Image (cartoon, rainbow, N blue to C red):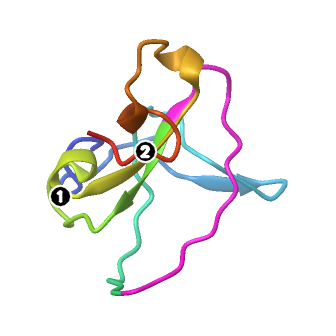
Amino acid sequence: TWNDLGKPAGPDAEWTVKDGVLRPGKVRGTWLVSDAEYTDFVLEFEVKLTEKGNSGVALRAPMKGDPAFDGMEFQVADLRYNPQAKDSELTAGIYR
């Protein structure tokens, strides 16, 4: 589930690739995670965010618990999602 990686996401949470774009399932708030653990790494990616979109990339997160709070989350969010957002809640911020 979105707030605990140790629990299954449930039906309709499958991620797919269409036209070269990674797309989430029908269930909002699911994480796409690697089974492997990494130490030092370089992560490169492109973001295509919808208007008022809100997402993130979990870094250094345990495989149980909420990645945004029990690990680190690199925030990806459109300012229109939350016009009063702090820097840590906008794209490129480490969430809270």
Q: Residues within 10 Å of mark 2 (few under 14, many from 20)?
A: some
In the image as oriented, which residue stretches furthest toward the right? 19
Could you tell me the amino acid type at mark 1?
A: Gly
Q: Is residue 27 above or below residue 84?
A: below
Give the magenta range.
40-54
What kind of element bears circle 1? loop
What kind of element bears circle 2? loop
Q: State the residue position of label 2.
A: 93
Compared across the picture, whether 47 is left or right of 39 comes to: right
Residue 28 vs residue 62, the one in the foreground: 62
Residue 6 shows which numbered tag?
A: 1
* Mark with earlier residue (2, 1): 1
Residue 66 vs residue 7, the one in the foreground: 66
Location of the N terminus by quadrant is top left
In the image as oriented, which residue stretches furthest toward the front? 87
The majority secondary structure of the magenta stretch comes to loop
Residue 89 shows which numbered tag?
A: none
Q: Is residue 88 above or below residue 72?
A: above
Q: Quadrant of residue 95?
A: top left
Residue drawn where x is 64% and y is 54% of the image? 16
**Residue 88 image point, x, y percent:** 37, 37
**Residue 18 image point, x, y percent:** 77, 52
User: Real-space Cα distance between discs 2 and 1?
Assistant: 25 Å
**Residue 21 image point, x, y percent:** 75, 53
Q: Quadrant of residue 52?
A: top right
Residue drawn where x is 21% and y is 66% of the image? 63
